[in-house]
Structure formats: structure tokens, C-alpha cells
Image (cartoon, rainbow, N blue to C red):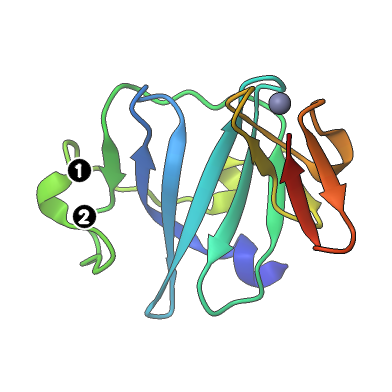
């Protein structure tokens, strides 16, 4: 896990509420990693995972994280190819690791699933009454 611990956050894209991270971009040795975030309303926690050519790790972070109401936070130290800087409403230097931003994380073994009825995300071991796991299909089934 040390590879992930050393990744430096270079951009945080917030959701429409301006308070929850939607995508976080990290950088190390010329490589950018994109982290997707899903917020669970029921549990008031986040699921997040990296996208790209690394082994995918899923994490859960059980404390709320509040940002101010800017849409993006972006380091001005680097040219970031993964986002268009024209979209940024605020430029700031971020020089902390993803572990520092999310210190209370725990690794989970699969991604959360979306319930269309609850309009929320649930882990496979704590589904709402509208979701269940289908062993044959290897995926969640929505009622
Ligand atoms: Zn549900």
C-alpha cells in the first residue's frame, strides 16, 4: 500500500453540493491516478477507489469531509492532463497525500452498489432491502 500512501493530490473535483469530493487526482513520478468517490447518504461515509493501470483498491472512509464551495482545487505546480484547467474555479497548491486527506480509511474487498430506489450506495455486506448479491451472476440484483 505504500505506493498509494505516497501519491500527492494535485486536484480535487467536488460534486454539485460543493462539499463532497467526486474525483481526486494524484500524481507520482509522471503518472496520474484518478480516484472516484461515492458518498453514502445513509452512513455518511465515502467509498473510493482508483482507476487506471494499478491494481484497484476499494476504500471506505467513515468520517465526513467538508470542503468550501469551490468546484475544483488544483495544484499549480503541475500541468495536469486529465482535467481542463479552464474548468477550475480555484487554484491552490495541494501538497498532501491521499492518506492525509482521508486518514480514517479502511480497505474493502469490492465496490459499493447503487440502489435506484434508495438513491444511495451500499456495500455488499450491508445492502438495503432492494439489493441482493447473486452468486451465479457475480453481481448485485436490483429489486
Ligand atoms: Zn434500496
Per the model, the C-alpha gap separating discs 1 and 2 is 6 Å
Would you place residue 20 above or below residue 47 in this image? above
Asked whether the residues under the numbered discs 1 and 2 touch, taking CB atoms below 8 Å apart as contact, a structural biologist would say yes
- Left or right: residue 141 versus residue 79 is right
Instruction: List the residue tagged with mark 2.
Output: 76
**Which image quadrant for residue 77?**
bottom left
Q: Name which residue lies at 90% across and 59% down.
A: 135
Is residue 112 visible to us here?
Answer: yes
| Front-most of residues 142 and 30 | 142
Instruction: List the residue tagged with mark 1.
Output: 91
Q: Name which residue lies at 73% across and 34% down.
A: 143
| Front-most of residues 61 and 76 | 61
- Left or right: residue 71 versus residue 115 is left
Task: Pick out the residue farthest to the left.
Answer: 86
- Left or right: residue 22 versus residue 112 is left
State the image coordinates of residue 128 (x, y, percent, origin top left). 79, 27
Would you place residue 104 above or below residue 54 in this image? above
Ligand 1 within 8 angstroms of badge 2 C-beta: no
Question: Which of the four quarters of the rendered structure image does ligand 1 lie in?
Answer: top right
Task: Pick out the residue farthest to the front.
Answer: 143
Amino acid at each position: 500500500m505504500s505506493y498509494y500512501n505516497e501519491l500527492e493530490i494535485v486536484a480535487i473535483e467536488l460534486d454539485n453540493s460543493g462539499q463532497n469530493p467526486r474525483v481526486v487526482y494524484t500524481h507520482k513520478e509522471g503518472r496520474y491516478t484518478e480516484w472516484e468517490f461515492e458518498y453514502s447518504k445513509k452512513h455518511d461515509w465515502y467509498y473510493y477507489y482508483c482507476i487506471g493501470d494499478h491494481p484497484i483498491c476499494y476504500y471506505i472512509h467513515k468520517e465526513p469531509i467538508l470542503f468550501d464551495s469551490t468546484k475544483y482545487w488544483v495544484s499549480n505546480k503541475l500541468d495536469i492532463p486529465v482535467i481542463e484547467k479552464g474548468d477550475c474555479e480555484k487554484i491552490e497548491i495541494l501538497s498532501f497525500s491521499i492518506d492525509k486527506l482521508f486518514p480514517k480509511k479502511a480497505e474493502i474487498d469490492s465496490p459499493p452498489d447503487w440502489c435506484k430506489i434508495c438513491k444511495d450506495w451500499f456495500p455488499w455486506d450491508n445492502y438495503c432491502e432492494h439489493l441482493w448479491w447473486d452468486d451465479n451472476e457475480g453481481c448485485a440484483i436490483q429489486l
